[in-house]
Image: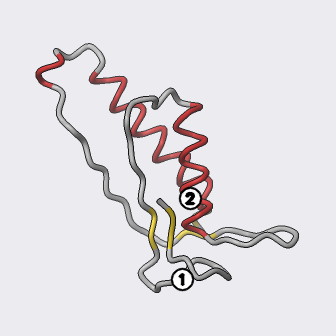
Amino acid sequence: MCIAKEEAEKLARYAATLVATSRNAPASSIKPLALLAGGETTVQLKGNGKGGRNQEFALAFAIAAETHGLTKQWTLLSGGTDGRDGPTDAAGAW
């Protein structure tokens, strides 16, 4: 079972490692980077909360990105191919 929060942490840590590796490279050699990941994650809601795995993943990634010093411009899109993300009308998070 892949827990959304844990997988987001792994991806943010990986992205931060890639950025750190390029810090000593000449600015002219640094190119935009896109990471693509796939899989089915899970999330367990507590209390009366609403949301789903993609919303949890996006929020956890944002928190982990800050924690790991991923301060440059980045965008994350987490979407569900089934068109649903928990008990909401959203199919993901941006």
Left or right of 25 in this view: 67: right
Question: Residue 13 appears at what percent x and percent y?
Answer: 48, 38
How far apart are the two marked residues, 2 and 1, measured between alpha carbons?
14 Å
* Disc marking residue 57: 2
Q: Residue furthest right?
A: 47
SS for dot 2: helix
Q: How has the structure been colored for display?
A: secondary structure
Question: Residue 85 appears at what percent x and percent y?
Answer: 57, 77
Q: Residue furthest bottom?
A: 82
Left or right of 47 in this view: 18: left
Q: Which residue, given by chain and number where applicable, does mark 1 sit on?
A: 84
Question: Residue 48 appears at what percent x and percent y?
Answer: 85, 73
Q: Is residue 45 above or below residue 74?
A: below
**Tag 2 near tag 1, CB within 8 Å:** no
* Residue at the image point whose x is 46% and y is 86% from the top: 82
SS for dot 1: loop
Left or right of 42 in this view: 35: left
* Residue at the image point whose x is 39% and y is 66% from the top: 38
- The amino acid at mark 2 is Phe
* Residue at the image point whose x is 57% and y is 40% from the top: 64
- The amino acid at mark 1 is Arg
Q: Is residue 72 above or below residue 47?
A: above
For the residue carrying disc 2, how many other residues have a C-alpha within 10 Å: few (<14), some (14-19), or many (20+)? Answer: many
Dot placed on the residue nearer the N-terminal end, 2 or 1: 2
Examine the image and state in which quarter residue 39 appears. Answer: bottom left
